[in-house]
Image (spheres, grey):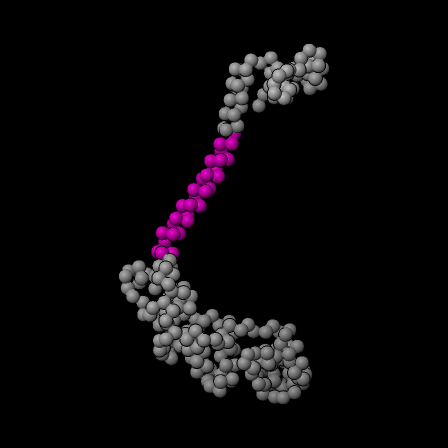
Amino acid sequence: MNTTTARGRAFRRIGGAALVTGAAACTVAALIGTLPAQASTPPAAAAAAAAARTTAQHHTLGPAATSAQHAAALRDAELRKIQRAPGTKNLNAYYAAGYKYEDALDLAALWNSADRNHAKSTAGADLRAGHALPFAPGTGFTRSYTTAQQLRAYEIAEVDDARLADRLATAWKVSPAAAKAKAGALALANRPVPLEHPTPSAGDASTAFTSAGYDYTDAVKLAQIWKIDAYSAKVRAGQDLLSSPQVPLPIQP
């Protein structure tokens, strides 16, 4: 930018009715090290200079604007790529047909799928191909399922507690396999089942163990029964006491 021209413009009065001239102009020019050249610049020349500055600013901002546009174009292209992907189209078809998350468990059990997402993708592909699914949206719970399908539903239900089946078996007085099948059947029927209760922390379990009246001697006895160390027995016993349904311990305080 021409700093001489800019300084000259700064001395114009509002409205442009008068210019700083004479001794005052010379004094100011001496302070800033240059004369206000634009004070005597013809209007046509001033307009040309302004146009030149605008063009220069445009060229200066050009690369940044181009870079932003390029980044936006890349994002749009990636989004279109995802939208065109078969997996995305299958999921969109699944939900567009009215099927929901709960239906995916029923389908996964019927098809022995790896998980709910795999079942949804398979179902969407079938729908896009014009094939009917085994049941209408929201009606999978009305079907009858084999024991193998019930067990598969239990496994797919994202159980994060490896000992849940044992606790359910104790509460229901059945074998662990039968407990898994029963829990899976409840899940397929959209009925509540304690499939995702988090395991209590070691600290909470230890506190529950002590609060129930047990002590270190009891922990040693349980350790001998379960063939683990005393601390692990204390934690396991506390988790059983806090579990739902609660599992009775083999000894009393």
**Residue 84 among those drawn in magenta:** yes
Q: Residue at x 53, y 73 (%)?
A: 197
Q: Residue at x 45, y 75 (%)?
A: 191
Secondary structure that dominates the magenta span: helix
Q: Residue at x 63, y 19 (%)?
A: 12
Query: Which of the 4 image quadrants contains residue 100?
Result: bottom left
Which stretch is magenta? 60-89
Q: Position of residue 95 (x, y in %)?
A: 38, 61
Q: Hey, which residue is sitting farthest top in the picture?
A: 22
Q: How many marks?
A: 0
**Residue 244 among those drawn in magenta:** no
Q: Residue at x 61, y 83 (%)?
A: 223
Image height of 84 relative to 4, above or below: below
> Quadrant location of the C terminus?
bottom right
> Quadrant location of the N terminus?
top right
Left or right: 125, with 222 as reference point: left
Image height of 203 relative to 248, above or below: above
* Front in this rendered view, residue 88 or 232: 88
- Residue 112, visible in the rendered structure: no
Image height of 183 relative to 48, above or below: below
Query: Which of the 4 image quadrants contains residue 125?
Result: bottom left
Q: Hey, which residue is sitting farthest left in the picture?
A: 130
- Residue 12, visible in the rendered structure: yes
Q: Position of residue 112 (x, y in %)?
A: 36, 71
Q: Position of residue 97 (x, y in %)?
A: 35, 62
Left or right: 156, with 5 as reference point: left
Left or right: 250, with 132 as reference point: right
Q: Position of residue 44 (x, y in %)?
A: 52, 15
